[in-house]
Amino acid sequence: MSEAFRPPNLALATISLSLATFMQVLDTTIANVSLPTIAGNLGVSANQSTWVITSFAVSNAIALPLTGFMTRRFGETRLFVWSTLLFSLASFLCGTAQTMSMLILFRALQGAVAGPMYPITQSLLISIYPPHKRGMALALFAMVTVVAPIAGPILGGWITDDYTWPWIFFINVPIGIFASLTVAAQMKGRAETTSRPKVDYVGLVTLVVGVGTLQIVLDKGNDEDWFNSTFIVSMAVVSAIAIAVFLIWELTDDEPIVNLKLFRHRNFSMGTLALVLGYAAFFAINVLVPQWLQRNLGYTATWAGFATAPLGVLPVILTPFVGRYAPRFDLRVLAGFAFLMLGATCLMRSYFYIGIDFRHIALIQLLQGLGVAFFFAPVLTILLSDLAPHEIADGAGLATFLRTLGASFAASLTNFLWDHRAIIHHERLGEHVTIYDPATSTALRDLGGQQDAVAMINQTLTQQAYQLSFNEVFHLLGWIFLTLIAVVWLAKPPFEPKAGMTGGGH
């Protein structure tokens, strides 16, 4: 066991672990804004280029729940170091890709090796800090989780515009090498017990097939018109069968590859539910606001980035205080406050209109950051609080996997709802625009030529329809956050880590 292990330089170890996680989380969003440029350079359609995102998401989602198994097999430190080094290599290969097929292949490899990095960082941070400072470690980890997805599109846009797209991948190489070598040096001498667990092949195959096809359904559903597409229907059927077999097998097998029995712990169950739904709703905000700014208000990608960036200000400022003083409070109060603030800012956005100014948008983003600052660290602490030391890596991997899957559901459903409700609103608004309506006749006359006037009126209707749909989606998100206040209160104190919780021994 490694109960008393402390790295020679705790600050350096923390920075290295956080840098690697920042790099990996950043990579989930940095390529999004570069897709049009990548598609043009590699001579493919915009639709084909989205596989750059899908390939990473699919392999990452498959690898995440395997973290506990790989930890038992290789040990946490060795798994982290090799995952980070391989991530750097995969990033380099992505930057050198000459065809779209090569880039998709290397992105899939990058996603697979990135899988264990996030949960292992969580587990290692818990293990190297003394019990009374673990809240600070998790708060720092939470800040990285929040800031990286915000920084991704801004950094990706800047690199693509001012340099060339391969540099969005090349920048990972020195960071990854530094982080892996530093962590290897700092964790030298940290005792870890490894074993050779039986490989649960049925669980592994059904996980790969079930999660892989589900991720493809979620990523490609909107493009393929959902269940009107034979491809999407086929993928959904395969996914449903494979996941059903996976769940039955894992719950009855003696040595499952994913430990679903962790859900017997009340705090893990409630904490994970709050994390998954809360993060899905948070992710939906990050998907919808930049699109709305560009499509409805005519912002450029750069200005959309500036308008959304204030979200990261308060989490960066408040994280050290949350980490230091959170243990003095009932964590359910802090998490409840987070959901209250997130819900309130969503309900404020449900009253947005076409002519709203930059200042109002940025201020609500800033206010939302107050909720984000109190969301991640308390919820992560609650969900890990009743796990035994050897269950930490399993629990962190499983919670992160479900959170990632929740984000994929959120991205697909948000875009679908926004488009679907806009079509309905367009039809309703259009019912009132007829040549027999005096206001319409006047507008057609004032706008000059009939054809141009009809086109302009239709454009206005479309814009207003999307605005009404945006307001409805945020009304729904607001109530989801407010409902989560009740969920988090179903957890039971105490929320301190169990004695000897290090995540090191197995």
Image (tube, rainbow, N blue to C red):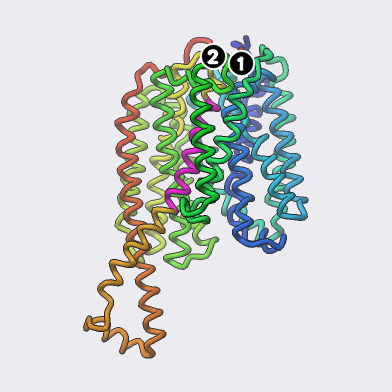
Q: Position of residue 174 (x, y in %)?
A: 74, 41
- What residue type is disc 2 on? Pro
Dot 2 surroundings within 10 Å: few (below 14), some, or many (20 or more)? many
User: Which kind of residue does numbered mark 1 sit on?
Assistant: Gly
State left or right for residue 160 relative to residue 479: right
Q: For the magenta stretch, what is the residue range?
A: 396-415
- Residue 281 within the magenta-colored segment of the rendering: no
* Marker disc for residue 389: 2
Q: Are marks 1 and 2 in contact (CB under 8 Å)?
A: yes
Give the class, few, some or many, for how many residues have Cα within 10 Å of label 1's Cα (few <14, many ≥20): many
Mark 1 vs 2, N-terminal side: 2
Quadrant of image for the C terminus: top right
Instruction: Find residue 227 and report its horizontal and vertical position in percent.
Output: 46, 51
* Residue in the picture at 53% in, 48% down: 219
- Which sits in the foreground, 155 or 245? 245
> Is residue 401 among the parts visible in the rendering?
no
Give the image location of residue 388, x and y in percent.
50, 13
Asked if 380 appears above or below 501 in the picture, the reply is below
- Residue 3 falls left or right of residue 88: left
Q: Residue at x 51, y 62 (%)?
A: 303
Callout 2: helix, strand or loop? helix
Q: Nearer the viewer, residue 495 or 281?
A: 281
**Disc 1 element:** loop
Q: Which residue is mark 1?
A: 504
Q: Is residue 96 above or below residue 453?
A: above
Which image quadrant for residue 49? bottom right
Where residue 24 sits in the image (x, y, percent)?
Answer: 62, 39
